Amino acid sequence: MPKEMNLFTSIKLGDIELHNRMVMAPLTRNRAGDGNVPQDMNVKYYEQRASAGLIITEASQISPQGVGYPATPGIHSSEQIEGWKRVTDAVHKQGGCIVLQLWHVGRISHPSLQPEGRLPVAPSAIKPDGEAVTYEGMKPFETPRALELAEIPGIIEQYRLAAKNARQAGFDGVEIHAANGYLLDQFLRDGSNKRTDAYGGSLENRARLLMEVTQAVVDVWGGGAVGVRISPLNPFNSMSDSDPQKTFDYVAEQLNQFDLAYLHVVEIAMEGAAEVPDFDFTQLRKSFNASYIANGGYTRERAESALASGGADLVAFGVLFLSNPDLPERFAKNLSLNEPDVSTFYGGSETGYTDYPFYH
Ligand code: PHB
């Protein structure tokens, strides 16, 4: 490790050469066009942020069944592949790197978003608290349908096809979304997985789907272009686990078999949780052999100290990249930052999306 290692030191992340260690975190913005196809303003938004060492796209559904929100992009139709191709071309022209986040929401959906109005699927028929975001406004979640054992290969196939589509769309790699209470996380944590077959019960069984999905995606891309995102403490989407340290240390260790590019860890609880269990992220980091991307409310100062202490190899910034397209330059030159406007985070037009000013 170079002595002067900081946010602006280059790094080889698996097969991907990055010119700095500032990662743009995946951010749901609900601005895809008809058919959940990336459109002009999405091209501009990502192009503006190409000075990030790595852009991780917003979560993008791998299949019509994987959809959980209005106007989130997909990677399962030819129009979506074409739309993303315009995004990756624009980012590459600016010298940037971009990976696609592969998403299946599982139970965090609603029949009105599902093909033929079907029930969302999950490891177990357990309804999350709260409401789904639909095209007709907020609606209470419904009890999902537990996936049959015979349906699991089809889920893995959805990931494999989406990974192939992402290659066709010109991405530098893919990130498997196993965080924040979506399908793969629903299998990992025991609050949402009560299965009694090979995909539930023991830790090995709960992690099985993630490992099989990772194998399928690695078969398409090679491990060096694949990352996995986890969120051991995040209660968002009614998630809980009886022993997060044991669960996620195991997950990190098991993922070592794939020689992945990175593990991306949401280290905070997104919702103001009353009590967050003790968790040793240093131990998690030690369990994993490749690069570690830390995420969760990092400031420049905290990021630099995480890199200096070995707490992380890279840091992902969400809101800061959302509101500052030129964040690396601003950090490098100690320039002031734009204020984010929360009211335009989700959905809408170019306002609050592509109109945050560059410093220069
Ligand atoms: C959201 O739309 O609220 C959302 C999507 C993906 C995440 C987290 C939150 O990983």
Image (cartoon, rainbow, N blue to C red):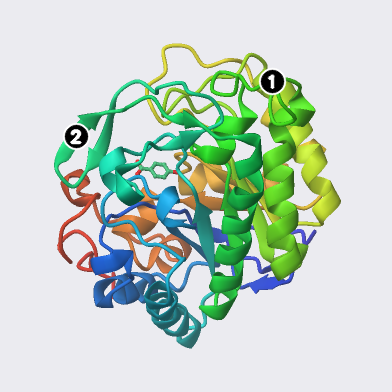
Amino acid type, callout 1: Thr
Position of 326 with respect to 10 (left or right) is left
Secondary structure category for the residue under label 2: strand
Q: Quadrant of residue 330?
A: bottom left
**Does residue 310 show up?**
no
* Residue 129: x %, y % from top left: 35, 20
Residue that appears at 81% across and 54% down = 258
Q: Quadrant of residue 193?
A: top right
Residue at label 2?
138
Q: Quadrant of the N terminus?
A: bottom right
The count of marks equals 2
* Residue 339: x %, y % from top left: 23, 51
Q: Is residue 165 or residue 65 the one in the foreground? A: 65
Q: Badge 2 local density, few (<14 within 10 Å), some, or many (20+)?
A: few
Q: Quadrant of residue 299?
A: top left
Residue that appears at 45% across and 76% down = 81
Q: Is residue 7 above or below residue 358?
A: above
**Does residue 130 show up?**
yes
Residue at label 1?
196
Amino acid type, callout 2: Met
Query: Which label was assigned to residue 129?
Result: none
